[in-house]
Image: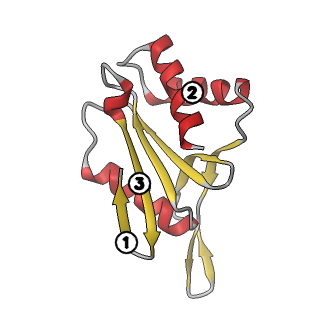
Amino acid sequence: MSRAVIGCAIEVHRSLGPRLLEPAYHRCLEHELTLEKVPYQSEVPLPVRYKGTRLDCGYRMDLVIHEHLTVELKSVRKIEPIHEAQLLTYMRLSGLKVGLLINFNVPLLREGIRRFVINQPMKLCVL
């Protein structure tokens, strides 16, 4: 799953290069995933469940792949802890165990990819 998404992201980065805004990479990655027949959902709303009530906090996951992997896209100078916290929040609230944080604003895309795996509740493995 992760491998297919990373391959598509590399293709987008090869074509566009760094230094564009995030929406361009997002739409091009969606197109590439479609070409490769990788099932995905885009801009998936993520409510918070609190005391039996669903609350809309404005969270939206950039991409959900095969209903098993969440992908957060960035085009920033440097991945900051807040970006990691955003992905981890989405993983925790959605129950998805694997997440990719992809920063397209790098010379080589492999330098901009971080994979997160939650093995058990509140135990994180960064690959």
Secondary structure type for disc 3: strand
Q: Which of 35 and 27 is in front in this view?
A: 35
Left or right of residue 114, residue 26 in this image: right
Q: Distance between the residues labelled 3 and 1?
A: 11 Å
**Position above or below: 19 against 126:** above
Q: Position of residue 108 (x, y in %)?
A: 33, 21
Identify the amino acid type marked 3: Phe
Q: Which of marks 3 and 2 is nearer the N terminus?
A: 2
In the picture of the structure, the residue carrying the numbered disc 3 is: 116
**Classed neighbour count for the residue bearing mark 2: other residues with Cα under 10 Å, few (<14), some (14–19), many (≥20):** many
Identify the amino acid type marked 2: Cys
Identify the amino acid type marked 1: Lys
Q: Where is residue 22 in the image (x, y as percent from the top left)?
A: 45, 30
Q: Which of 54 and 6 is in front in this view?
A: 6
Label 3 with label 1: CB-CB less than 8 Å? no
Q: Where is residue 98 in the image (x, y as percent from the top left)?
A: 51, 56
Left or right of residue 15, residue 47 in this image: right
Question: Which residue is farthest bottom?
Answer: 51
In the picture of the structure, the residue carrying the numbered disc 2 is: 8
In the picture of the structure, the residue carrying the numbered disc 1 is: 123
**Position above or below: 49 against 60:** below
